[in-house]
Image (tube, rainbow, N blue to C red):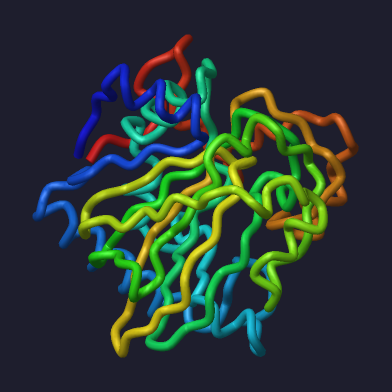
Amino acid sequence: MRTQLQAAEIEHYGDNGFVILEDFLTPDELEGWRAAVMEAVEERGDVRIPGFQGDSGGFYGRVFLQRVNLWQTSARMKALMLDERLGRLAAELAGVDGIRIWHDQTLIKGPWANPTAWHLDVPYWSFSSRDALSIWVALDDVTLENGCLFFLPGTHREATFDNVGIGQNMGELFQVYPQWATREAVAAPMRAGSCSFHNGLTAHGAHANMTPYLRRAMTCAYMPDGSRFNGKQNILRPEQLARLSVGDPLDDDAQNPLLFSRSSSGVGCRV
């Protein structure tokens, strides 16, 4: 795994709201991630999020197979997702002192899967931060044909926490941000084992999968340490929600483990 960032990569992320790291995993690591993800997905069955009901159907259910917080139900995924090195990279890109997991998730587009509409991430989450970000690891070669990501560079600097749902209208986000409708999108094809990081307020979407093969990706969303509850449920179970008031710190290590902190060492797992 790549554990060092170049100054140009950090600058690119700051300017554009995303950065691509080619060959992030070694070939052996890639095989290990693939095996762990697919095993964890099979074990999870049709439960999308622990503590919630099963998978959704309709158009959205045909966008991708989404299984959230596999680290909570799979020992192999816990070892991968709680790796301190991932937290260190995320903290360095975000320019924050500490990073917690918000949630991991598979984003597996099946053959002929629907496109993913333009959207922002943070407005869905239970905290509001301009420094939140996600890693997106390609487990297969990701191409223009099978559903690669697209980004609108620089939108993270302009976005508010307003949003629209991810539905069938690819450009519905532009009802909230009409000035983005004429922006040039940047495609992000990647070789298997590569990854991208993107800011949680960077507008992004993905093509449909126009092939008879899977397009597998494993992702994880990161929350700056010290973030506070904004009143939205998102992935929080009802019993967790009942214990929180707006403004409370989201520092429950059982739900949002601290991966990396500049003030301490040995926080996460090393694999």
Q: Quadrant of residue 38?
A: bottom left
* Image quadrant where one finds the C terminus: top left
Seen in the picture, residue 144 relative to 233 is either above or below; the reply is below
* Image quadrant where one finds the N terminus: top left
Locate residue 84 relative to residue 18 in the image: left or right: left
- Residue placed farthest to the front in the image? 182
| Residue at image coords 55%, 46% | 152
Residue 199 coordinates in the image, percent (x, y): 55, 38
| Residue at image coords 83%, 39% | 230
Locate residue 215 relative to residue 64 in the image: left or right: left
Q: Quadrant of residue 235?
A: bottom right
Locate residue 270 relative to residue 219 in the image: left or right: left
Residue 231 coordinates in the image, percent (x, y): 87, 45
Q: Nearer the viewer, residue 191 or 83?
A: 191
Q: Nearer the viewer, residue 106 or 161?
A: 161
- Residue placed farthest to the top in the image? 263
| Residue at image coords 30%, 65% | 142
Q: Nearer the viewer, residue 29 or 130?
A: 130
Residue 217 coordinates in the image, percent (x, y): 37, 63
Seen in the picture, residue 224 relative to 68 is either above or below; the reply is above
Q: How many marks?
A: 0
Q: Quadrant of residue 122?
A: top right
Residue 141 coordinates in the image, percent (x, y): 23, 65
